[in-house]
Amino acid sequence: MLMKMIIVGCGRAGSTIAVKMSLEGHQVSIIDKNPLAFDRLPPDFAGTMVVGTGIDEDVLIKAGIKETEAVIAVTKGDNTNIMIGQIAEFLYKIPRVMVRIVDPKVKQFYDTEIGLPCYCPTEINADYYIRFLKEGNGCIS
Amino acid sequence: MYIVIVGGGKVGYYLTKTLLAENHEVTLLDWDYEKVKLLKQDLGEAVIFANGSSIDGLEKAGCTRADVIVAVTGDDEDNLVICQLGKRYFKVPKAISRINNPKNERIFKELGVGTTISGTISIVASIEQYLAKQHIIRLMSFNHEEMVLLETELFAGCPAVGKKISEIKLPNECIIITILRGKNALFAKGDVVLESGDLVIAISTQNEQAAVKKALIGGEPSA
């Protein structure tokens, strides 16, 4: 099933997701406040690039939030991701939302208290290393 | 009251200073070490170096016993998280957020942060009110647009307020017809003293409209 999706933050994570999903035929819109961030995308990138801050509703509308089926927030700011995620999840009721929250305690709060779909790379990394230290094999993938 | 303020910019600084002077207990948090050093010189122990959008930072500030949390950073996403953590995690009874982008007022409200203050919105509202007051409304024109019927509301500070109609230096080609005061319509005799809140109805020529405005509500004759 091909989807329309918005990715906010064209860093290493965002650009990787955008390129892979676009190559699979999904309709990708990627937002970053710094136009130079789009240099991470290949010249033949088929998706849409939108310059602006993802917490600005007008920017999200320009990226197609009214029709999109998924929103991923992976900017380097936890609070930016949290705000974007809540706009997508609670205001626009987007079916698939996922945001990155680096602070484990804040992630726990938004997960359980607010009901925001989120994950914490810090926890995932820690688990990986702990498993490696205990078992000598941390390779999850 | 015990008030936790996050964001040591101009708003946070003056807010803390004001509330301390009113004998409230205040803690101001900022995440910029150099700024905290400067703020401490003036506000002393009320200032702490802590991240206000982290649970540890808010705990350090004693949020568990705070009566009010106020988020006044320059970033709306930070203010949102600060208020949500304050209200939902620390159960602070009142969370107040500064809003930088007026468009975020609705978003904050829908996400449970209903008490917001927007400097931009306040300034715009004040300016609009000021402009509206400066306004002189043209009710109708006649005699091939040569003559106009005007209405204007007087407010405190207008040159005409406190004066008798006979004392107002109106242009020759103008006459005040009536003063609407509350439910009454006063006949514009020379000894009627104008008050703030009066609606003045006048006839003048098109050319003298600006001069009428100047005589009644002041300002440069420009319109």
Image (tube, rainbow, N blue to C red):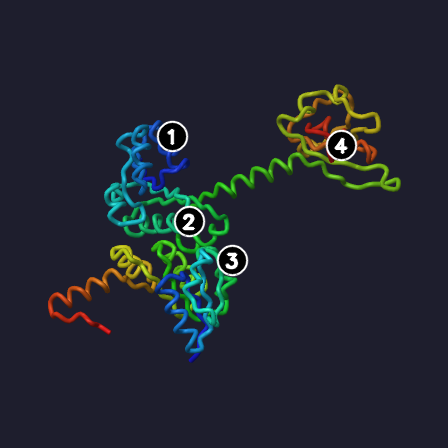
How far apart are the two marked residues, 1 and 3, measured between alpha carbons?
Answer: 36 Å
Seen from the viewer's position, the closer of residues B137 and A103 is A103
Q: Look at discs 2 and 1 and give the one toward the viewer.
A: 2
How far apart are the two marked residues, 2 and 4, measured between alpha carbons?
Answer: 44 Å
**Residue shown at the point (40%, 50%) measured from the top left:** B113
Q: Is residue B201 left or right of residue B146?
A: left
> What residue is shown with label 2?
B76
Q: Is residue A113 above or below residue A29?
A: above
- Give the number of the disc on residue A106: none
**Residue shown at the point (70%, 20%) measured from the top left:** B163
- Say whether mark 1 and mark 2 are on the same chain: yes
The three-letter code of the residue at mark 1 reads Thr
Q: Is residue B117 left or right of residue B50?
A: right
Seen from the viewer's position, the closer of residues A7 and B65 is A7
- Say whether mark 3 and mark 4 are on the same chain: no
Dot 4 falls on which chain? B
The three-letter code of the residue at mark 4 reads Ala
- Residue furthest bottom as drawn: A1
